[in-house]
């Protein structure tokens, strides 16, 4: 019952709060749809949603493709596979705050490692987190770096594919590429689907990393103001609890609709074994 | 566990028939390493330089190309961090969050999970479905109302909001543990009952020892979640003496952003226990992720 008290109650409360004006000190005042009207007119709402969608659209597919390629290579009985797997996985267990601090150093324009590396090829690196163009790609880079968990999930999925299928395919003369397209990828679609759904849900909630990288501001010029930082600022900096609740309801709705859409579309591309779960 | 119910390939068959494409496999192996090696360097090198930079003076950090092994090795950054930020205090405070979270995972969640797996109660399945549905709700949805609740209870500014909810376990852990308990044959427990063992004794004496692997996984999940937890401390803690590592490191980052040696030393101190744990319990990390991933 503890769960009901701490989860179900707050969900309903959140719903109700979205229709109020509340700063914790004065009693909550019912304002109907005012918060939602303000929200439509609020440019920062659009900026933060746009930034978040940008990051989701880039980081989720990129993380999935990179993880899939690595898992594919690691699944082929490579010598030193355990060491490789550990190497690719380890960044994903680094605490968000620490990895943000680390990338702050790596992306430092003058003597950061990233620009030093680019310099080897005669490329003058951008100012990364100080540039409105490159601040979001910086965050996406960090997220891809930390996507080792997805790789592990893919690797486990790949190892579940029976060897006999590949043998049958190679007896039929299927090349490596054809085996990938006609055996591996179809059988991996349920796993890919799972990581897609979880990736979208998780990335819409990006917070800690960006908060640390930008000193809690989502700068420069709001170019990394992600949705949850905006919710945080409204709730805990300006103490506009009602407005912040309305904001989080909208995000919840977006995530819910996207997840349902994903599930609905799954029938078209996700392979399902003829088995009863 | 994750793969138990799946059809395993018959290894004997695979062994008898050698794979075709023998001649090209050597070349392919080299090709794989050509791709994998630079990739893994990209993933690992940042962490190597985190440690390396933590052992450098500012003058050495500005060098290009950067030294992998600092010359000379400067240890002074580590004690100096404590001069600016009481890391030992942050460390103890973090343990104040980590230990109750582990207790909630191992004790509360496993009791609840066992009840869901074995005991009969009216409406049990309905409650279980409600429990599962709370797993689908992202944390930010409940964040504000929970904060208001804790503000009313006058808990804000202390550890209580970061400890008490976690003592009650989590839906995800209950779910994982229940799934595992269901795979334990009932006969084992029935045998214990016939010998006169009570329900609780059977649970602690028979079920829990069998569940050690999944308990290890759940413990690691709980540890990682509370060690890394950032938003909670950010919202609820205001007194510097109560800061946990994540919050302390963030404040340190903002205050001493240019002091890369110090910052990397502080970061290394937060990362080291996680990496250590990973090397001791690698297996449980991996099963944990695949368990939550594949069977969702």
Image (cartoon, coloured by chain):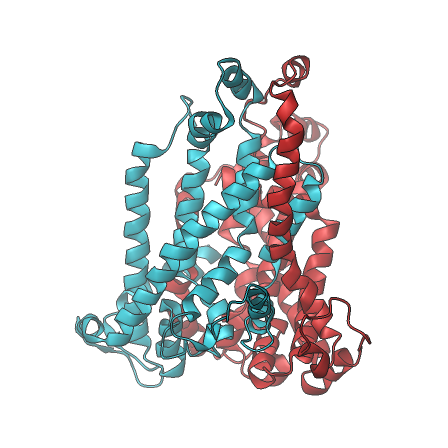
For the view shown, which residue lies furthest in the right direction? B72
Which residue is pictured at 32% across the width and 79% down the height? A240
The answer to whether residue A75 is left or right of residue A165 is right
Residue B11 percent location from the top left of the image: 65, 19
The answer to whether residue A177 is left or right of residue A103 is left
Question: Where on the picture, by quarter, is residue B192?
Answer: top right
Question: Where on the picture, by quarter, is residue A102?
Answer: bottom right
Which is more toward the observer, B122 or A257? A257
Which residue is pictured at 35% across the width and 85% down the height? A25
Which residue is pictured at 60% across the width and 21% down the height? B21
Chain whose colour in the figure is red: B
Is residue A275 placed above or below A125 in the rendered structure? above
- Which quadrant does the C terminus of chain A fall into? top left
Residue B54 percent location from the top left of the image: 72, 74
Residue A175 percent location from the top left of the image: 49, 23
Chain whose colour in the figure is cyan: A
Residue B75 visible somewhere in the drawing: yes
Which is more toward the observer, A246 or B203? A246
């Amino acid at each position: 019952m503890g769960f009901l008290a701490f989860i179900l109650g707050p969900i309903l409360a959140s719903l109700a709060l979205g229709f109020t004006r509340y700063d914790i000190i004065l009693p909550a005042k019912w304002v109907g749809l005012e918060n939602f009207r303000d929200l439509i007119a609020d440019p920062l709402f659009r900026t933060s949603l746009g930034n978040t969608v940008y990051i989701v659209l880039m980081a989720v597919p990129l993380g999935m493709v990179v993880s899939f390629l690595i898992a594919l290579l690691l699944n082929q009985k490579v010598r030193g596979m355990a060491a490789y797997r550990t190497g690719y996985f380890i960044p994903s267990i680094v605490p968000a705050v620490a990895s943000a601090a680390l990338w702050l150093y790596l992306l430092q324009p003058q003597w950061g490692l990233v620009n030093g590396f680019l310099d080897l090829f005669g490329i003058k690196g951008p100012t990364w987190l100080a540039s409105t163009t490159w601040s979001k790609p910086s965050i996406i880079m960090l997220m891809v770096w930390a996507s080792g968990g997805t790789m592990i999930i893919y690797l486990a999925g790949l190892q579940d594919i029976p060897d006999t299928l590949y043998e049958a395919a190679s007896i039929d003369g299927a090349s490596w590429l054809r085996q990938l397209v006609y055996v591996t990828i179809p059988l991996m679609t349920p796993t890919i689907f799972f990581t897609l759904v979880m990736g979208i849900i998780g990335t819409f909630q990006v917070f800690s990393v960006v908060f640390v990288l930008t000193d809690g501001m989502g700068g420069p010029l709001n170019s990394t103001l992600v949705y949850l930082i905006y919710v945080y600022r409204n709730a805990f900096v300006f103490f506009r609890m009602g407005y912040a609740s309305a904001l989080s309801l909208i995000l919840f709705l977006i995530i819910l609709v996207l997840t349902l859409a994903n599930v609905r579309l799954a029938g078209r591309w996700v392979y399902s074994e003829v088995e009863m779960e | 566990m994750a793969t138990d119910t799946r059809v395993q390939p018959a290894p004997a068959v695979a062994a008898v028939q050698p794979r075709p494409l023998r001649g090209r496999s050597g070349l392919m192996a080299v090709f794989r390493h050509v791709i994998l090696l630079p990739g893994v360097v990209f993933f690992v090198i940042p962490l190597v330089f985190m440690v390396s930079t933590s052992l450098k003076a500012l003058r050495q950090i500005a060098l290009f190309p950067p030294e992998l092994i600092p010359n000379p090795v400067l240890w002074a950054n580590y004690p100096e961090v404590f001069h600016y930020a009481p890391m030992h205090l942050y460390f103890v405070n973090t343990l104040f969050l980590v230990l109750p979270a582990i207790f909630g995972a191992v004790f509360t969640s496993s009791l609840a999970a066992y009840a869901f797996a074995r005991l009969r109660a009216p409406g049990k399945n309905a409650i279980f479905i409600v429990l599962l549905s709370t797993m689908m709700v992202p944390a930010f949805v409940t964040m504000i109302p929970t904060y208001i609740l804790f503000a009313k209870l006058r808990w804000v500014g202390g550890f209580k909001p970061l400890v008490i909810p976690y003592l009650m376990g989590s839906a995800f852990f209950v779910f994982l543990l229940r799934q595992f308990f269901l795979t334990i044959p009932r006969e084992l427990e029935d045998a214990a009952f016939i010998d006169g063992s009570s329900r609780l004794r059977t649970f602690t004496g028979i079920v829990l020892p069998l569940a050690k692997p999944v308990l290890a996984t759940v413990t690691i999940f709980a540890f990682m979640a509370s060690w890394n937890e950032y938003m909670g401390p950010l919202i609820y803690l205001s007194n510097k003496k109560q800061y946990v590592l994540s919050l302390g490191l963030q404040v340190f980052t903002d205050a001493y952003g240019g002091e890369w040696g110090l910052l990397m030393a502080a970061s290394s101190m937060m990362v080291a226990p996680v990496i250590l744990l990973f090397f001791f319990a690698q297996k449980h990390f991996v099963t944990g992720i695949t368990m939550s991933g594949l069977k969702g």
